[in-house]
Image (tube, rainbow, N blue to C red):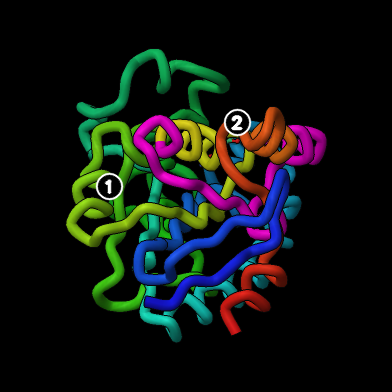
């Protein structure tokens, strides 16, 4: 079993590659491309694109090392039976979840906008988890997939830092997974929240996990 040490904050962490999964959170067209859910909420979607290349480099390395790679997509059933009214009934009624946008119905499973951006598209065999919530554990099979694969550590990437990445890291931390977050593989519509979100993870001796960057992980893997 190959174990690597990754420089991180608040301190370096040693992980077994075979017990580590890369989790790509919600790198979906709805969040990253114009005309999707993210823009409908009033956000500048171009703020997220800086994370794409670092995510791609990390994905390539993870695949070379035959690590488990898991992708998530936020989205709902076409009849919205898995979407709480409290989540749907926000903002401009014409731009809500389920409404027709330029990339199909907003955040509905199977619609073009709900799918993952082409640059980071899942390879055959990589689990893709459709999740109705912000956290990737809520109402999904993620935990059983991790258990079946003997995973103890997660490298969590994706968007947005302070929403779905943070919620997932918090959920994972409570379930006993060590979470390593490469900050350059994450992004937020609100840059200040990205920065503070990362600081919150690593504060207090790593209260939710470890923060590093993709280059440091790639160096440790080589
Ligand atoms: N994936 C994710 O973070 N969903 C969001 O709705 N994020 C926002 O920041 N809006």
Q: In the rendered image, which residue does mark 2 sit on? A: 207
Q: Nearer the viewer, residue 7 or 65?
A: 7
User: In the rendered view, would you say 87 is above or below 113?
Assistant: above
From the top left corner, tell me how far across and down residue 198 is, in percent: 70, 40
Q: Residue at x 70, y 61 (%)?
A: 7
> Which segment is the magenta one?
172-197
Q: Nearer the viewer, residue 138 or 68?
A: 68
From the top left corner, tell me how far across and down residue 87 is, in percent: 42, 20
Examine the rendering and report whether any part of residue 42 can be seen: no
From the top left corner, tell me how far across and down residue 146 is, in percent: 27, 53
Q: Answer whether residue 181 is magenta in the image.
A: yes
Quadrant of the image containing the N terminus: bottom left
Q: CA distance from mark 1 to mark 2?
A: 22 Å
Q: Residue at x 48, y 32 (%)?
A: 170
Secondary structure, mark 2, is loop
Q: In the rendered image, which residue does mark 1 sit on? A: 142
Q: Residue at x 70, y 69 (%)?
A: 216
């Amino acid at each position: 079993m190959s174990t690597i040490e990754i420089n991180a904050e608040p301190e370096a962490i040693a992980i077994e590659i075979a017990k580590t999964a890369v989790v790509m959170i919600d790198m979906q067209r709805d969040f990253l491309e114009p005309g999707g859910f993210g823009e409908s909420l009033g956000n500048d979607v171009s703020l997220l694109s800086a994370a794409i290349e670092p995510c791609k480099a990390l994905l390539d390395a993870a695949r070379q090392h035959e690590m488990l790679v898991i992708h998530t997509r936020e989205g709902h059933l076409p009849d919205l039976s898995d979407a709480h009214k409290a989540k749907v009934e926000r903002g401009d009624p014409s731009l809500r979840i389920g409404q027709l946008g330029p990339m199909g119905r907003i955040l509905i499973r199977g619609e073009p906008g709900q799918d993952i951006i082409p640059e980071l598209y899942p390879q055959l065999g990589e689990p893709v988890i459709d999740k109705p919530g912000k956290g990737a554990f809520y109402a999904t099979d993620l935990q059983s997939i991790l258990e079946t694969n003997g995973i103890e550590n997660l490298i969590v990437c994706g968007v947005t830092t302070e929403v779905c990445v943070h919620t997932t890291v918090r959920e994972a931390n409570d379930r006993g997974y060590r979470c390593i977050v490469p900050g350059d593989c994450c992004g937020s519509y609100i840059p200040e929240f990205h920065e503070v979100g990362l600081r919150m993870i690593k504060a207090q001796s790593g209260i939710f996990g470890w923060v590093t960057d993709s280059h440091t992980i790639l160096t440790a893997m080589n």
